[in-house]
Image: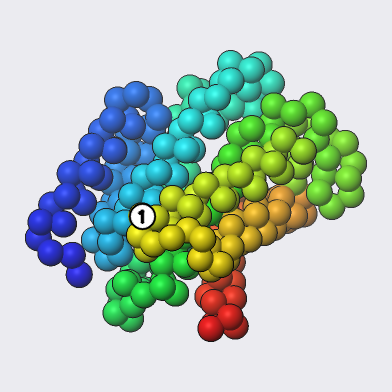
Amino acid sequence: MLDPGSLALVLVLCTMLSVLSYWFGLLSASGAVASFMVGIIIGGLGSIGWLLTLIAFTFLGFFVTKYRFQAKKKLNVQEGTKGERTYRNVLANGLVPAAVAAISFVLGMQGSEIAGLAFISAVAVAAADTTASELGVLSPNTYLITTLEKVPPGTDGGISTAGTASCIAAAAVASLVGWLAIFRSSPLDPLIAVPIVMGVAGCMLDSVIGATAERSGKVTKLQNNMMTMAAGSALSVVLYLALA
């Protein structure tokens, strides 16, 4: 459990992030409230490093969402009316990391290497998927991952060269930031490959589910996000135990 001083810092960071995000139109009012609550859980039950990792992902998401926003709007593939995200988006990307924090806290393992890897892996999946989606929709050459049929940008399950490259880059960046913020050790450790691989694999799984269950209406986009993040986090634990 964090000491009172650290908890106060968590409260300040979460408040600033939510207020500024709402002020600049990055989050709706409901999104700002949800962001505050998720941040408190992650920072309070995990650590400051966990919260900083989530904040870094949040800023990455905002950046790629706003990137060439007018072009996305012309294609009608933009997020919200001005790029803002609601509580649904926040919960879709924040519930799994919050669950990892809560479970780790209950088990008394929030400071362990395996818990840190599970958390980073969940964030890496979210970062890879968000970045691939926001940058991939700008590519005119988009193909359905299951059949390789050419489809319009923004189609559920569609992939592109730009989107795939962005997915890999985002998974690597998120893993590096998380590693430095949480473990504060050399990123040359071979274990950093675990969240990177999980980030890319989770993003690809998201596309497969998008092309099948999501397109048929069996799951929503946000449910897809949560399932793939949970899968990436759980598989990172399996990989860690297998490599130990």
Closer to the camera in the image, 53 or 148 = 53
Residue 104 visible in the shown view = yes
Say which quadrant the N terminus sits in: bottom left
Q: Residue at x 16, y 57 (%)?
A: 6
Measured along the vertical axis of the image, is residue 47 above or below residue 152? Answer: below
Q: Is residue 200 above or below residue 27?
A: below
Q: Residue at x 71, y 50 (%)?
A: 207
Q: Residue at x 46, y 33 (%)?
A: 62
Secondary structure under tag 1 reads helix
Instruction: Give the percent coordinates (x, y) of residue 85.
Output: 45, 35
Query: In which image quadrant can residue 223 be found?
Result: bottom right
What residue does disc 1 label? 181
Q: How is the image coloured?
A: rainbow
Q: Position of residue 235 (x, y in %)?
A: 59, 72
At horizontal 32% and vertical 53% (from top left) the residue drawn is: 51
The number of numbered discs placed on residues in the rendered structure image is 1
Q: Amino acid at mark 1?
A: Ala
Report the side of 240 relative to 17 (left or right).
right
User: Left or right: 63 with respect to 225?
Assistant: left
Residue 12's x, y, as percent?
A: 17, 44
Q: Position of residue 10 (x, y in %)?
A: 21, 51
| Crowding at mark 1 (Cα within 10 Å: few <14, some 14-19, many 20+) | some
Towards the viewer: 162 or 155: 162
In the picture, measured across the screen, residue 139 lies left or right of residue 100, that is right
Residue 99 falls in which quadrant of the image?
bottom left
Judge whether residue 123 can be spotted in this image. Answer: no
Q: Say left or right for 208 vs 38.
A: right
- In the rendered image, the residue lying farthest to the left is 4
Towards the viewer: 196 or 150: 196
